Image (cartoon, coloured by chain):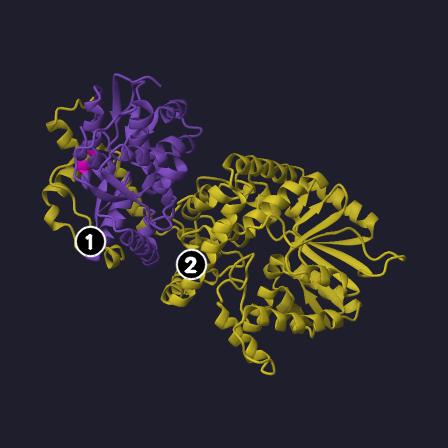
Chain colours: A yellow, B purple
Amino acid sequence: MNQTAAFHRRIDEALRNDQLRQNFRSALSGIQSRREAQFPDDAQLQALREQSRQVRANALIKQPELLEQLEEKLLANGIRVHWAETPEQANATIHGLLKAAHARLVVKGKSMVSEETGLNHYLEQRGIEVVESDLGEFIIQLAGEAPSHIVAPAIHKNRREVAELLHKHYPEIPYTEDIDQLTQSARQILREKFAQADAGISGVNFMVAETGTLCLVENEGNGRLSTTTPRLHIAITGIEKVVEKLSDVPPLLEILTKSATGQAITTYFNMISRPRQPDELDGPEAVHLVLLDNGRSRIRVDEELLDTLRCIRCGSCINYCPVYVQLGGHAYGTVYPGPIGIALEPQRIGLDQVGSLTSACTLCGACGQVCPVEIPLPRLINRLRAEAVDARRTTSSLIGRGSLRKPNEAGLWKLWRLLYSHPRLYRLFSFAATRLRRLTPRRLGGWTDYRSAPMPARQSLRELAREEGFPHA
Amino acid sequence: MPKPASVYYFGTCLVDLLYPKAGLAGMQLIRREGIEVIYPDGQTCCGQPAFNAGYRDEALGVARSLLTCFPRDIPLVVPSGSCGGMIRQHWPELFAGQPEESRVRALAGRTYELTEFLVDVLRISLNDLGEPMKVAIHTSCSARREMGVADRIESLIAQLDKVEVVTQERREECCGFGGSFAVKQADLSGAMVRDKTDALHATGAARVISQDCGCLMNIGGALEKQESSLETQHIAEFLLERSS
């Protein structure tokens, strides 16, 4: 099945699931109102967005130097840095580190980059037990699913579904749908894992080049436990997460937590700068950072597409997307769903693989309006559509340019151009369309499954304007 | 800007064939304020359908033809947020590096969406002659986010003292039209317009008013299919019908 047909099949499946759509509608409405409550003053919000955009844009421009500086500082702090160009390299590096440390049980904090590499599967195949310790990630790990949202991975599950899932995997725990009790049960299960784990793996939100600091934003304390309790901590993230200075972090942190979950600040904010020192009582003996490229360097060289890399993964664009709320994340079939997924995934993976994602967008602009770092998402999506159907126009480094061009569709647009760029021809057409209006087809593909067919008026506006005596030149 | 003596009017392709009365009403509202409204004969389409579908060469060809219709240095008024947004926001991008680029930038700077022109330039004042009525306003995403003129339609309707505006849930959410989106993603678009019409029904409004015929074709077509009594109307027709 080609990518477009496969995408449509996933969309059909999602649209048939009313429960799923209700779960999303209610969850996203909640997140939207919490976010809006954090930004009562629009002028302040716009100033913070602009400041955050500048911080990220500046870091991307200086990225090569900043990464060098970061590595130097991290090494000086005692944190080892590993570079991975591909997901396979990242996975192999992490597996090598775990093997050398004889690690058999790993606890993980939330990391979307590890989803990019398929890390859990890779390690499990090699005999290492991996336990997701973020509550949402824990739930979908039990369900054997991928995250359907980058911040709230189990957003598609309601309370009853979570209760049933926990009961299925832990029948000894009495069945309950009480959220506090469910959380307590998960907490107890995870506490044991933290105590036993040989290693912890986490993501990173920001890396500070100036100081060699890894910042980790979280709410449940699982990030702190994953990075401090086991004797080995491995962080994995994308190379674009580097920022220049420590003073760059406060604006980004503020706009991240407010945008992502509508919190003024998260419960935990970790700044990791070194492994345990001889006089310290806790912390890991060794800390490693795996830096993944996976297409990012290729994206960075295009001066328009580069904006995609400003993303701080708050998920706001997803929360406000009128398409995502109908579909949920799984229908996209990629690691990153929603507007950022539509913009990023075809760049990362190729238009020939996932370019049809770009069709799932009305260009309504809601995503671009809320993006905390002002990524022009609709503009990027429009650009990708152009690249998907036309390989000639640009010399960009995108993979699969022109791969979605269909001769019949391209032919129709050529015909359309002929008609609409020749006013006399168009006049003939509009005369025929208005006079023969009764012949307009009553069924117009999928349009008339949900709406009546539009019918041309008796006379065109051009004719009416003339009759009413409006000058025409 | 001061009131101009004349303006160009770009009716848009959708209005020309499907909603000419809405287009004409916009022209009459402007003429009523003592301004000459020129409707250039050679106009067709702004190129937006092809531009949004990724066919930029085709969009450019059509946009280039339309550009020749507006040679004089007078404002261009468009009774549609999305076509106005196309000319104001996307034409400069589409024409980048082309010989017409500077002309296009100048035109973009004097292009107005109709409600924006009525409020900001004409400072139109309306006297309500109609019967009491409840309406809901659907602002198109392009008028709201691309052109930033969502409040103009609201302030115009607020001048009509017998009209009560009721607000639908998720007022700012897209109706699911999106041009070729409604064809390429028909089921998804159908689900979105269903949510929109449900929210509009819940308000108890008698009529839905919008400044974009794309949204009206989508929402109105869905309401008709649902055999709803809720009517849809373009803001220009609504204002002309009710006011003096």
**Percent x, y of residue A167:** 55, 79
As shown in the figure, which amino acid type bears the numbered disc 1?
Answer: Glu
The verdict on residue A355 being magenta is no
Q: Quick one: B34 or B84, which is closer to the camera?
A: B34
Q: Which residue is mark 2?
A: A25
Q: Quick one: B44 or A179, which is closer to the camera?
A: A179
**Lateral position of residue A226 relative to residue A169, left or right:** right
As shown in the figure, which amino acid type bears the numbered disc 2?
Answer: Arg
Snapshot quadrant of residue A25: bottom left
Q: Quadrant of the N terminus of chain A?
A: bottom left
The stretch of residues the image draws in magenta is B20-24
**At x 52% / y 73%, what residue is drawn?**
A177
**Percent x, y of residue A317:** 49, 49
Q: Secondary structure at mark 2?
A: helix
**Percent x, y of residue B60:** 35, 34
**Percent x, y of residue A101:** 80, 68
**Lateral position of residue A382 relative to residue A142, left or right:** left
Q: Quick one: A453 or A326, which is closer to the camera?
A: A326
Residue at mark 2 to residue at mark 1: CA–CA distance: 26 Å
Asked if B39 appears above or below A316 in the picture, the reply is above
Q: Secondary structure at mark 1?
A: helix
Question: Which residue is the extreme one toward the bottom?
Answer: A172
**At x 59% / y 50%, what residue is drawn?**
A295
Q: Which residue is mark 1?
A: B224
**At x 42% / y 65%, what residue is drawn?**
A20
Asked if A340 appears above or below A163 in the picture, the reply is above
Mark 2: few/some/many CA within 10 Å (<14, 14-19, 20+): some
Chain letter of mark 1 equals B
Asked if A451 appears above or below A73 in the picture, the reply is below
